[in-house]
Image (tube, rainbow, N blue to C red):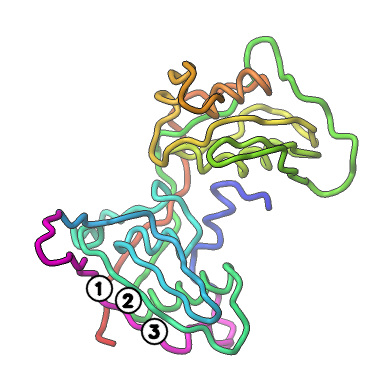
Amino acid sequence: MVRSVAILLMAAVAPAQTGVPAPAFEVASVKRYAPQLRPGIRGIARSDPAPSQFQVSGTRVSIRGNLMRLVGTAYGLEPFQVSQSKEWAENWATSEVYEIDARAPGDATPTLAQVREMAQTLLAERFQLKVSRRSQLMPVYNLVVAPGGVRIKPGVSTDPPLTRDDGSAGVHIRVRCLNFSMADLVEAVRRQFDRPLLDKTGLTGGFDFSLDYIAQIPGMTADVAAAMDQPDQEPGLPIVTSLREQLGLRVVPAREQAEILAIDHAERPSAN
C-alpha cells in the first residue's frame, strides 16, 4: 500500500457526517496503568513502557500507552506525526499510561483497519478527543539520487508492487522488490527513521531491486545509522548505507513543511 505522510493524515480527520454510526467496540474498559512488582523486587515504573501496538486475540483487543501513543496507533501514524496543538497542551498526555481492553462486535477477528476505526471512536467518546491536520516546518529526511546516479533497473512487470523475502532473519532484512515506485520504497522503509522520509528523487515509474540491511533500533537517527558501517555481531549495513550503496539513493537531513495530526482537545477518560 502506497501512502505518503499527507495521504496518511487525510484519514486522520473525523469522517463526514453520513448518518451511519461510526465503527465501535461492543464493550471496552479503560483504566490507568499501574505496573505490578513482585514483593521484594524494586523497580522504576516508566511513564510509557513501550511503543503501543494492538494485541488482537479473536474478538478481544488490548493496547497500552500514553495518549500520544494511543492516538498515533489508532490513526496508523508514527510518534513524530502526532503533536499537541498550541491551544491544548497537557502533561498528562505523555506522563499517564492507560490500558484499553475491548471486544469487537460479532464473532470474526477484526482487521487492523477495523480495529483502528473502533479505537478512534473510543478515543473520541472516552477521552473526548478532537484532532485536526496541520502543516508545520519540521525536521525531515529527503530521499535524493546519490552522486553517480541510481543503481536500480526499471521494472519489467505491469503487476502491482510485490515484495519477496530473500532470506531475512531476525533484524537482518533481505528483500526483493518488484515494480516498486519511489513512493513504495518510502512506505517500505519509513519506519526505520525518526522523521518523515520524503521522496525528492524525481524518479517515476516502477523499479526492480534488492535491499539488504539491518533494521535499526526504533528512535535511532539516520545520522547515527550512517556512521555504523563497521561490522557488528551480525553482518549487514544500516538502512541509510544500504540505500546509498545498493540503490544509489541518499538520505539527507532537511527542514520541510510536513503535515501532522494535532490534538486540539482531550480529557482524562470517563469511568468504565
Q: Which residue is mark 3?
A: 28
Q: Are marks 1 and 2 in contact (CB under 8 Å)?
A: yes
Three-letter code, disc 3: Ala
Q: Which residue is most to the front? A: 40
Whether residue 147 is situated above or below residue 263 in the rendered picture: above
Instruction: Name the mark on residue 128.
Output: 2
Residue 34: percent from the left, percent from the top? 20, 69
Real-space CA distance between mark 1 and mark 2, rounded to the nearest whole angstrom: 6 Å
Q: Are marks 3 and 2 in contact (CB under 8 Å)?
A: no
Whether residue 254 is situated above or below residue 187 in the rendered picture: above
In the image, the segment drawn in magenta is 16-43
* Disc 2 element: loop
Real-space CA distance between mark 1 and mark 3, rounded to the nearest whole angstrom: 17 Å
Q: Is residue 127 left or right of residue 16?
A: left
- Residue under the image location 51 percent in, 72 percent down: 56
Q: How many marks?
A: 3
